[in-house]
Amino acid sequence: MLRIPPLYGALALFTLLTTPTTQAVETLQLFAIFGEKAVVVIDGERRMLTVGESSPEGVTLIETRGDSVVVSTEGGEKTLALGNQLLAGDTRKVSNKVTIVQGSDGMYRSRAWINGQPLDVLIDTGASSVALSERHALAINLDYLSHSQPLQVQTASGIANAYALKIDRIKLGAIELRDVSAVVISGSYPTEVLLGMTFLERLKVVHNGRFLQLERRW
């Protein structure tokens, strides 16, 4: 019987470095996205920009797109995807890291893409598996009945019927994992998707103050 401990999560922050588009700007770091606002660290200086606003360094926020933003510098427009890290002058991808900040309630929450569909998730190191409710599965058209194994799980509300399966792709910022074991639980529990250890065990997880740093192991 699979036990799913109480969930927890929090506000999301992700980081990346990208190739500069002008000689003046050495590094750009996308630190967080809040609707039409984004926190961008430009050569070490943190700037909160609204769409259409320019920083003193000449970086303009053009658009926010869920897990990425479009900025403009003297060299043209550049899409910055959360977590993708590039060194100045180098187009090679050098890291798969995501940093999430702890919320005022002590929890960690983010947006993930499951088989290409966006869902809010709770980063839960106490949950043994990635877990979705039946409602979540239906919302993203996840066929959890055809290729799954029926089982029962212990939830906060008692024993519930569930289905064990493999999810093709789960993407969190720059980290994308394939063939991730998960359970879909009948009913409305959990109220938010639990990103549990079947996902996190393949990452290096480091607590650093109020930040949770995730890095792909393999």
Image (tube, rainbow, N blue to C red):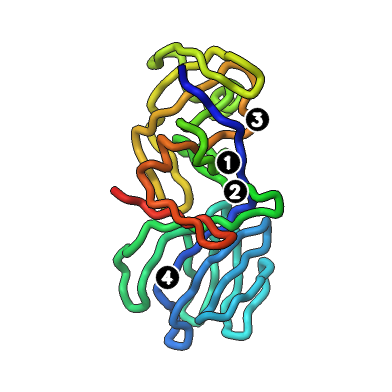
Q: Residue at x 45, y 56 (%)?
A: 206
Would residue 119 appear left or right of 75 to someone viewing this image? Answer: right
Residue at image mark 1: 122
- Dots 2, 4 in contact, CB < 8 A: no
Viewer-proximal residue, 23 or 150?
150
- Under circle 4, the secondary element is strand
Vertical side of 159 occupied by 58: above or below: below
Residue at image mark 4: 18
- Under circle 2, the secondary element is loop
Residue at image mark 2: 108
Would residue 5 appear left or right of 81 to someone viewing this image? Answer: right
Disc nearest the viewer among 2 and 4: 2
Q: Residues within 10 Å of mark 4 (few under 14, many from 20)?
A: many
Number of numbered markers: 4
Residue 65 percent location from the top left of the image? 57, 54
Residue 69 percent location from the top left of the image? 55, 61
- Under circle 1, the secondary element is strand
Of the image marks 3 and 4, the number of the one nearer the N terminus: 4
- Image quarter of residue 58: bottom right
- Amino acid of disc 1: Leu
Q: Residue at x 47, y 52 (%)?
A: 173
Residue at image mark 3: 191
Vertical side of 51 occupied by 196: above or below: above
Q: CA distance from mark 2 to mark 4?
A: 25 Å
Residue 102 percent location from the top left of the image? 62, 55
